Image (tube, helix red, strand yellow):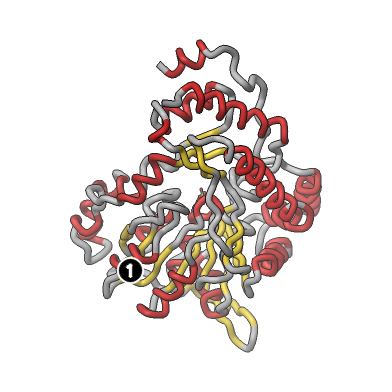
Amino acid sequence: MLTKLAIKRGRPIRNKPNPPWPFVSKEEKQAVMEVLNSSVVNYHVGNKGKEFEERFAHWIGAKYGISCNSGTSALYCALAAIGVGPGDEVITTPITFFADGLAPLLNNAITIFADIDPKTGNLDPNSTEKKISSRTKAIIPVHLYGHPADMDGFMELARKYNLYIIEDCAQSHGATYKERMTGSIGHIGAFSFCQTKIMTTGGEGGMLTTEDPEIAAKLMSARNIGAQTLYRDGKFQKIGGYSRLGHNMRMTEMQSAIGIAILKYHINEYIKKRRENSAYLSEKFKAFDFISPAYEAPKVKHTYYAYPARLHLDLLKVNNSQFIAALKAEGILVREVYSSPGHTQPIFENLKNYSKYRSPWRASELDHRNEEYPNLEFYKKKTILFEVHPTIDKEYLKDVVAAAEKVGEAYHK
Ligand SMILES: Cc1ncc(COP(=O)(O)O)c(C=O)c1O
């Protein structure tokens, strides 16, 4: 029905290639070639990895940066470093990339979900508190789409119940909460540099940030095959031997060189552009009654990994999937929020035997598929994600507004 309507309403608003993301700058290409030409390509041998870690931590406002090969690895290492293991529970949000649901399981612990704040889409500290048990070891709030989670709320829970807070900053590079960058507030920050992210180190990559040298040493060990690493006499020392489970999750020197180039030449401009593009859409969307601009809470800086607008479905004849399909038919880059949340994943059924060999859990404790999260349902039903990445220009944004107006009018009640 919608395709027909879109065709009936004439030519699409936009009929040309959309602005690409990621964009690989000349500085990044040059940096990679320099590393390749030097033949020093491995983290242990070169110094790019260490330089990238230092620069990134400095930019975030954290003491230590520990690079790794993905955001998923970063979350795995974070939980490993704080000693999460069999018998432990980790609480996270159901609405995120599934790496957050998976990281506790990879550490032989279990994942517990809690509901979200319907305004920001982020894990809600009140709902989280209700899920805390004597077995809870950590909470992973995700700064969803670049909007910082309620870090005061989570740090309060950490103090009250003696828990660790692992910030998932995969989507929030440069976002701030009360003037502090995400990744510098909790016990550990976990970043992804995978290709769609605010910055990418050549398609994959990750970083951990922390203030605590003891935790930093364990993170270094976990991402490096469990090689014993200690913080002694004010420095990190590899003392030989292997003391914990770990994998080889190191970054290459080429990836680190790309990261350094982005930090040196582009990151501030990338974030500025995302915020400018978002401000433009927010201003224009104010003129429409069927869509609300993306929410930005007081005292935070949203960095808009995606721009989450809200549809007023009571004023529309269609649901958000149909609205999105119609916008796509107009040539606009737009998508729904995660359509299959963490608690619904088939892995929880497939883990029936998990408890037998990995952990003291009963299968029923692992399985979350029948749980209900009303705020999540509300958020999912009404949110629509626009792209605002740095290569997006005014012409594209004008098309977005024109397409939203066209679709909104066509389907207005
Ligand atoms: C919120 C969130 N957490 C974790 C990850 C995992 O990162 P990666 O894809 O680098 O493993 C992603 C990336 O897709 C993400 O968006």
At a point 66% along the width and 25% down the height, the residue shown is 17
Q: Amino acid at mark 1?
A: Glu
Left or right relative to 33: residue 87:
left
At a point 77% along the width and 58% down the height, the residue shown is 264
Left or right relative to 412: residue 52:
right
Q: Position of residue 32 (x, y in %)?
A: 75, 49
Element carrying mark 1: helix
Left or right relative to 185: residue 105:
left
State which quarter of the image contains the N terminus.
top left
At a point 41% along the width and 80% down the height, the residue shown is 159
Q: Is residue 41 visible?
A: no
Left or right relative to 300: residue 222:
left
Report the residue marked by disc 1: 129
At a point 55% along the width and 54% down the height, the residue shown is 296
Front residue of this view, candidates 317 and 361: 317
Tally of marks: 1
Front residue of this view, candidates 338 and 288: 288
Q: Position of residue 378 (x, y in %)?
A: 36, 45
Q: Is residue 189 visible?
A: yes
Q: Position of residue 329 (x, y in %)?
A: 53, 21
Q: Position of residue 221 (x, y in %)?
A: 52, 70
Front residue of this view, candidates 79 and 276: 276
Q: Residues within 10 Å of mark 1 (few under 14, many from 20)?
A: some
Q: Is residue 369 above or below residue 408?
A: below
State which quarter of the image contains the C terminus.
top left
Q: Is residue 27 above or below residue 228?
A: above
Q: Is residue 193 above or below residue 388?
A: below
Q: Is residue 142 above or below residue 22?
A: below
